[in-house]
Image (cartoon, rainbow, N blue to C red):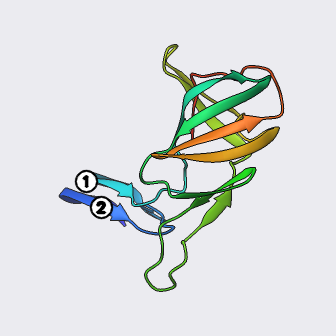
Amino acid sequence: MHDVTIDGRGAELVYHGLQTAFASIRSTNVTFTNFSFDYAAPKVIDATVAAAGVTAGHAYRVLSVPAGSPYRVNGTHITWLGETSPATGQPYWSGVDGPEYTQIHDPVAQKTWRGDNPLFSSVAAVTDLGGRRVRIDYTTSAAPGSSTRCA
């Protein structure tokens, strides 16, 4: 395509499973406008550190997990789940703990950067607290940062 405008006229698209949002291949001067999109269960996990500290000599973090991110806790791990396929009854994707890198946001400093994933190193236990809150207890005693948001 060349010199084309694709006008969504206010459409709101919701993707299910693993999808590529848009692709304009071997094309020039293509404009996509007037629509929004979201994923029913995004593969990027958006967890907020709601609390952090040290109890009985061991560090911990409490994560707040958004509704669009299904998960399962198992001992020292958390398995993130994609949306369940209506055809197979299985999640479209799953992943254990976190990626090798993370995007970290400090709302106080209003800064965002990528770095190592600090959430799943030296984990002693992962506990589902209910209400979409997960506690991660660590084998270390150093107080973890409390103002990070990881994706």
Looking at the rendered structure, which numbered label has been put on residue 35?
1
At mark 1, the secondary structure is: strand
Farthest top residue in view: 109
Q: Quadrant of the C terminus?
A: top right
Taking the spot 71% from the left edge, 24% from the top edge, the residue there is 55
Q: Residue at x 77, y 34 (%)?
A: 138
Of labels 1 and 2, earlier in sequence is: 2
- Seen at 47% across and 67% down, the residue is 83
Of 121 and 73, nearer the camera is: 73
Disc marking residue 13 = 2
Left or right: 144 in relation to 90: right
Q: CA distance from mark 1 to mark 2?
A: 8 Å
Residue 71, given in percent of the width and then of the height, sits at 56, 57
Dot 1 amino acid type: Phe
* Cβ atoms at labels 1 and 2 below 8 Å apart: yes
Instruction: Name above or below for residue 91 compared with residue 32.
Output: below
State the image quarter where residue 124 is shown.
Answer: top right
Q: Residue furthest left?
A: 9
Name the residue nearer the viewer: 16 or 27: 16
Query: Is disc 2 surrounded by few (<14), some (14 to 19) or many (20+) residues within 10 Å?
Result: some
Vertical comparison of 99 with 102: above or below:
below
Q: Quadrant of residue 4?
A: bottom left
Quadrant where the N terminus sits is bottom left
Judged left or right of residue 35, residue 16 is: right
Note whether 71 is above or below 116 in the view shown: below
Please name the amino acid that badge 2 sits on.
Leu
Q: How many circles with numbers are drawn on the protein? A: 2
